[in-house]
């Protein structure tokens, strides 16, 4: 399958992939880490989150992995497949091109240095 | 308070589990437990801002919306060719657009035929939809008038008012009218405004030809306001700047007044009319569509003309910064925001403070004209929108239930069509065409209903906005109705349509469509729909319960008055003929004549009657050591002898005014209990002095400026009363307490006024009881509407429950027969059905209570002395529904016990 066929990626899907690239996670940890990594800007509520996860699972961008805790079968962790990684790279490249186009038009301000 | 928190948590979890049913079964199986876990995390985690209950309600709403979205997305995938299905699709012949249109037409024809075959169903469904869509469209018309259409002036978004602010030492800033010098300063020293005008509203006596004088609302305005509001004349001319000089008495007559008073006689332009005993030249007529910035007024004169026409408004007095009785209207210059305008006005205030002409606790504020006028009504409109949305949802669920019941009768038909080669997509399309047709028919009938309802709903919502905001069912509202009916059609059609596709061909073609158990055939969905209806009805019940309590609380406020048997009227004495002595004589003669009537017990003449008019505050000095040298703000009333007795206000200390308190006599004053408590908390104030007047009495606190405390009405404001003869006002209100009827009593007032001066119009005829009642009228009519919506909701939800229970009993006849044959008593069967119904109702009610906690917050600002979490109201709403629900189930349950085992088993 061609990774570029999934580009452009929906923003929330991209957020999910970004967080999962840091390592596999359970559903609620995903919700938490997306909120944290975006400074609370993006909060994916469970309904929207799991609809998107269903799609990403069905398209093979992410997969369910056994994290070796057989005690709780609900706690299935999610991880990015190699194909998912390729899609994320393609999306990043697309965003990069877009940003470059914006930069050429002097739309991108340098971030303030004091920002920690 | 750990326990309530835990209970709320449990309720939210429970509600979330129920809400998960919005998702398709396989999705729920796959992700349900994880979603619940994520929800719990989201709700309780401190990472995400917000109270647990708010996030919880939000999360529940989200899961319902997403679930519906998922079902919808799947349906669309089934009906439309998608990437994943492209290969399969390629095997079939491509569908041409024309063919598709033909199919829809055929579907529509088929649908119409099938509706004709089931008239009872069609009628019931249409009636429900008509109510739902009609009410929604009517509410939308009001919202449209308030929010989308806005004010009928060109570029109305740039219109602002500048108001004065007064910041008391211990309290929030209050808004005040403005003074003429302040207006001139703003006009001169700011650049933010493209134009600025001042206006003043007065009631004048208008005499045209040889008619009786009539009281007419008039506006004295800066001529530039006409162009600011985009007005142009129908006849003659409007006012121009040159008109605005003190001696120039000209008037522009509004189209409405011109038609009613002069029969649209165009020769009136250029003629003279008599206003407050002076001749005024009519120079023009406004166009019919000109609303003026102030509804109800249709006589406009130059601002400075009031110095000749209105008592107490000499040019010299208008130069006083303390005479704050005017209103501004200004237009922001293009590209200038309200903040910049505010900054400039602040600079003017600061320099006035520096010059010492404006006290430092005074300032000015620039406010949007649209928000000012429409703000409070928008709150009510939002509440009604939510309420009507919920009613519409219940209506949809109800019709969906009807459709599903109807489809069970069509199992064979559907199976046959499938067997003949119809795809699932074809079936869904056919069924959706039917439901959309129903929806649109309901929309047409609903629009007709809306035209009638809009006036009723508008009357309640719009009582606080100018009367040129008139909601009508216009093109936008009709488009809304069509949109809503189509969406409703899809919404209530989708579940039944999907349900129909699950019917298996082989099974249903066999005659034994009758199943022994109660499940199957979308029965679970039908139960879920009933639960949704109940759950959605509860917030409406709770909301109207809270409103009822609030209105009752407001009515229970002790006004300090005895309104029964008191009639009121008003009369204005023209300054030209009535100086202070003449006013005094008039008032004394009027009161004397009224008290001669046997039916009148007591009469009084005063500057104002509680809750019925403007009121004026003055600064007084209290002659007590600790307060000396300070100014205190008090409200002042000029009242004649018998004022307190007539109105039923109790005299606590000292005496009421009598006929000895005359002009030239010793200056006296009566103070309110509030005033006494503030300045003489531990002693009797009688004999003390206020502004060099001796206190002769203390009276009970009464409500003068509004029942419910708010920005302009603090219950702590002190009131003082001075004898009318020592401070005679030109605007007089007359009250009589008597045994006669209202008509008789007000008839006396009218007759006596006309006998004393045949040129004076008597106006504002009413009763004290009506004046008090008018204070709660807006919230009462909002309550009635919310109550009506709650009633419809309750009726539909209970009806839905009844339908499902009847249907269940019908389906389970065989089972009941078997049970009874095996020895079950009628009591057992009755208990079984009532138990089942109770479970449905309880689940619905509990979910509804959680929903209510989230939604009734909208009402917060409209409630008086009752919180949005008032436990009693919730319990009453829940109990009311439980009772109504159980009553609705008794008939089906009894019917179940009447099953004859022999009959039902024989048909097996």
Image: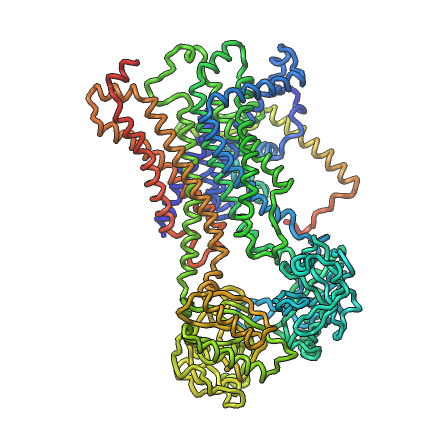
Residue B538: percent from left, percent from top: 41, 42
Which of the two residues, B524 or A34, is positioned nearer the viewer here?
B524
B814 on left or right of B621: left
Residue B633: percent from left, percent from top: 54, 76
Q: In this figure, which colouring scheme has been used for the structure? A: rainbow
Q: In this view, does B626 lie above or below B435?
A: below
User: In the rendered image, which quarter is residue B233 located in?
Assistant: bottom right
Q: Quadrant location of the C terminus of chain B? A: top left
B56 on left or right of B306: left
Q: Is residue A17 above or below residue B821?
A: below
B53 on left or right of B519: right
A33 on left or right of B178: left
Which of the two residues, B49 or B281, is positioned nearer the viewer here?
B281
Which of the two residues, B237 or B744, is positioned nearer the viewer here?
B744
User: In the rendered image, which quarter is residue B172 located in?
Assistant: bottom right
Residue A8: percent from left, percent from top: 67, 29
Please identify the residue farthest to the front as the structure is shown: B210
The residue under the point 61% across, 67% down is B215
The residue under the point 33% across, 44% down is B879
The residue under the point 62% across, 52% down is B469
Which of the two residues, B385 or B743, is positioned nearer the viewer here?
B743
Residue A20 appears in view: no
- How many numbered discs, if any? 0
Residue B472 appears in view: yes
Residue B159: percent from left, percent from top: 69, 57
């Amino acid at each position: 399958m061609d990774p570029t066929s999934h580009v452009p990626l929906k923003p929330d899907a991209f957020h999910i992939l970004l967080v999962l690239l840091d390592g596999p996670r359970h559903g609620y940890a995903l919700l938490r880490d997306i909120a944290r990594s975006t400074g609370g800007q993006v909060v994916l509520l469970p309904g929207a989150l799991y609809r998107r996860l269903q799609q990403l699972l069905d398209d093979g961008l992410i997969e369910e992995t056994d994290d070796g805790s057989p005690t709780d079968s609900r706690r299935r962790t999610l991880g990015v497949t190699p194909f998912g990684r390729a899609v994320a790279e393609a999306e990043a490249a697309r965003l990069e091109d877009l940003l470059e186009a914006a930069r050429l038009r002097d739309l991108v301000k340098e971030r303030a240095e004091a920002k920690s | 308070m750990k326990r309530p928190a835990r209970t709320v948590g449990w309720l939210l979890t429970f509600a979330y589990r129920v809400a998960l049913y919005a998702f398709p079964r396989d999705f729920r199986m796959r992700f349900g437990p994880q979603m619940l876990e994520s929800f719990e995390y989201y709700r309780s985690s401190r990472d995400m801002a917000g109270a647990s209950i708010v996030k919880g309600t939000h999360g529940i709403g989200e899961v319902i919306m997403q679930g519906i979205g998922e079902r919808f997305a799947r349906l669309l995938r089934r009906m439309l060719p998608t990437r994943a299905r492209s290969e399969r699709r390629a095997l079939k012949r491509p569908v041409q657009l024309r063919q598709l249109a033909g199919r829809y037409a055929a579907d529509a024809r088929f649908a119409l035929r099938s509706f004709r075959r089931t008239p009872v169903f069609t009628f019931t469904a249409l009636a429900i939809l008509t109510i739902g869509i009609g009410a929604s469209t009517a509410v939308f018309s009001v919202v449209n008038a308030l929010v989308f259409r806005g004010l009928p002036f060109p570029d109305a978004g740039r219109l602002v008012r500048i108001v004065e602010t007064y910041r008391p030492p211990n309290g929030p800033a209050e808004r005040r009218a403005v003074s003429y010098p302040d207006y001139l300063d703003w006009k001169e020293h700011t650049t933010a405004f493209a134009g600025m005008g001042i206006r003043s509203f007065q009631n004048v006596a208008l005499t045209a030809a040889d008619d009786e004088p009539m009281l007419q609302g008039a506006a004295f305005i800066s001529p530039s306001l006409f162009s600011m509001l985009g007005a142009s004349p129908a006849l003659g001319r409007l006012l121009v700047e040159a008109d605005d000089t003190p001696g120039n008495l000209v008037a522009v007559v509004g189209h409405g007044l011109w038609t009613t008073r002069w029969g649209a006689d165009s020769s009136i332009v250029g003629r003279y009319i008599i206003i407050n005993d002076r001749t005024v030249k009519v120079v023009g007529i406004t166009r019919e569509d000109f609303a003026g910035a102030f509804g109800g007024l249709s006589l406009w004169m130059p601002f400075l003309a009031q110095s000749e026409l209105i008592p107490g408004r000499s040019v010299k007095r208008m130069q006083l910064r303390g005479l704050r009785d005017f209103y501004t209207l200004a237009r922001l210059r293009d590209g200038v925001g309200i903040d910049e305008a505010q900054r400039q006005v602040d600079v003017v205030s600061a320099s006035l403070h520096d010059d010492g002409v404006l006290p430092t606790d005074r300032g000015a504020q620039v406010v949007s004209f649209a928000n000012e006028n429409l703000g409070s009504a928008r709150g009510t409109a939002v509440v009604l929108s939510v309420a009507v949305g919920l009613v519409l949802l219940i209506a949809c669920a109800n019709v969906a239930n009807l459709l599903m019941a109807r489809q069970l009768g069509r199992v064979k038909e559907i199976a046959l069509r499938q067997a003949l080669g119809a795809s699932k997509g074809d079936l869904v399309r056919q069924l959706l065409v039917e439901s959309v047709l129903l929806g649109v028919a309901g929309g047409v009938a609903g629009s007709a209903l809306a035209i009638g309802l809009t006036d009723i709903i508008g009357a309640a919502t719009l009582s606080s906005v100018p009367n040129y905001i008139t909601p009508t069912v216009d093109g936008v509202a009709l488009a809304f109705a069509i949109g809503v009916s189509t969406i409703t059609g899809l919404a209530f059609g989708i579940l039944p349509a999907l349900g129909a596709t699950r019917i298996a061909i082989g099974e249903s073609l066999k005659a034994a469509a009758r199943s022994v158990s109660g499940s199957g055939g979308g029965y679970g969905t039908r139960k879920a729909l009933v639960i949704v209806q109940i759950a959605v009805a509860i917030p409406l019940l709770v909301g109207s319960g809270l409103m009822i309590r609030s209105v009752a609380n407001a009515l229970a406020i002790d006004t300090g008055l005895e309104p029964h048997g008191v009639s009121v009227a008003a009369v204005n004495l023209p300054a030209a003929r009535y100086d202070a002595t003449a006013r005094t004589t008039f008032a004394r003669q009027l009161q004397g004549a009224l008290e001669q009537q046997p039916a009148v017990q007591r009469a009084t003449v005063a500057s104002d009657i509680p809750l019925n008019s403007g009121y004026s505050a003055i600064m007084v000095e209290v002659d007590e050591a600790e307060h000396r040298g300070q100014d205190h703000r008090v409200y002042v009333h000029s009242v004649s002898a018998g004022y307190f007795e007539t109105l039923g206000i109790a005299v606590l200390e000292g005496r009421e005014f009598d006929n000895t308190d005359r002009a030239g006599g010793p200056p006296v004053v009566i103070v309110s209990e509030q005033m006494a408590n503030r300045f003489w908390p531990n002693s009797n104030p009688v004999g003390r002095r206020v502004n060099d007047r001796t206190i002769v009495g203390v009276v009970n606190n009464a409500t003068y400026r509004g029942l419910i405390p708010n920005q302009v009405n603090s219950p702590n404001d002190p009131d003082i009363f001075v004898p009318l003869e020592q401070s005679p006002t030109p605007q007089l209100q007359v009250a009589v307490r008597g045994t006669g009827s209202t008509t008789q009593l007000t008839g006396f007032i009218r007759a006596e006024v006309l006998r004393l001066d045949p040129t004076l119009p008597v106006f504002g005829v009413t009763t004290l009881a009506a004046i008090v009642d008018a204070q709660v009228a807006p919230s009462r009519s909002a309550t009635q509407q919310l109550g009506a919506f709650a009633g419809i909701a309750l009726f539909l939800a209970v009806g839905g429950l009844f339908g499902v229970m009847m249907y269940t009993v019908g389906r389970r006849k065989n089972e009941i027969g078997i049970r009874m044959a095996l020895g079950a008593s009628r009591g057992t069967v009755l208990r079984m059905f009532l138990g089942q119904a109770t479970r449905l109702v309880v689940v619905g009610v509990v979910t509804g209570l959680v929903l209510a906690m989230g939604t009734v917050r909208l009402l917060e600002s409209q409630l008086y002395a009752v919180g949005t979490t008032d436990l009693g109201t919730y319990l009453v709403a829940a109990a009311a529904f439980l009772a109504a629900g159980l009553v609705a189930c008794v008939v089906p349950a009894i019917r179940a016990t009447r099953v004859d085992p022999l009959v039902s088993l024989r048909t097996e």
